[in-house]
Amino acid sequence: MANLWLKIKVWTKLTIVLALFFYAVVFIYQNASRRVTPWFWFDQARETSVLTLVLCAFLLGVIGTILFRTTLKTVRQLRHLAERSRANRLEREVADMRTKAAMLRSRAGPESSDAGAEAEADIP
């Protein structure tokens, strides 16, 4: 039974690929000889085939999509880098505050404990 489903799957894929290939051949045949005059810029009209125009438009679309995705990824990376640097800066500031607090405690520690002992000694 599994062999039957595998055969159906393979033949379906083969049929789809052949249909797409046949369509591509007919598309190329029909559009290779047709001429078109697209507008690109003011006073610049060049005659070309529809096939060339379609291929150029497709390639420009692919390049535009790649550039757009790259731009989005770069912006995301810059935001992530800014967040990470901010978090690192805050961690350093907290570590500095803790170091300063420890230094103040070590300085104030013996003096305050002596003062506390004197105060306790004065109490009858």
Image (cartoon, helix red, strand yellow):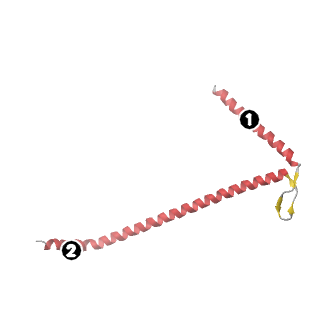
For residue 16, side relative to residue 33 (left or right): left
The residue furthest top is: 1
Residue carrying label 2: 115
Residue at position x 67%, y 30% in the image: 6
Q: Position of residue 93 (x, y in %)?
A: 43, 68
Quadrant containing the C terminus is bottom left
Q: Position of residue 41 (x, y in %)?
A: 82, 63
| Marking on residue 37 | none
Quadrant containing the N terminus is top right
Q: Is residue 44 above or below residue 103?
A: above
Q: In which quarter of the image is residue 61?
A: bottom right
Q: Crowding near pointer 1: few (<14 within 10 Å), some, many (20+)?
A: few
Badge 2 amino acid: Ala
Q: Where is residue 40 in the image (x, y as percent from the top left)?
A: 82, 61
Earlier-in-chain disc, 1 versus 2: 1
Q: Is mark 1 in CB contact (under 8 Å) with mark 2? A: no
Q: Where is residue 104 in the image (x, y as percent from the top left)?
A: 32, 72
Residue at position x 17%, y 73% in the image: 119
| Marking on residue 14 | 1
Residue nearest the viewer, comparing 45 with 19: 45
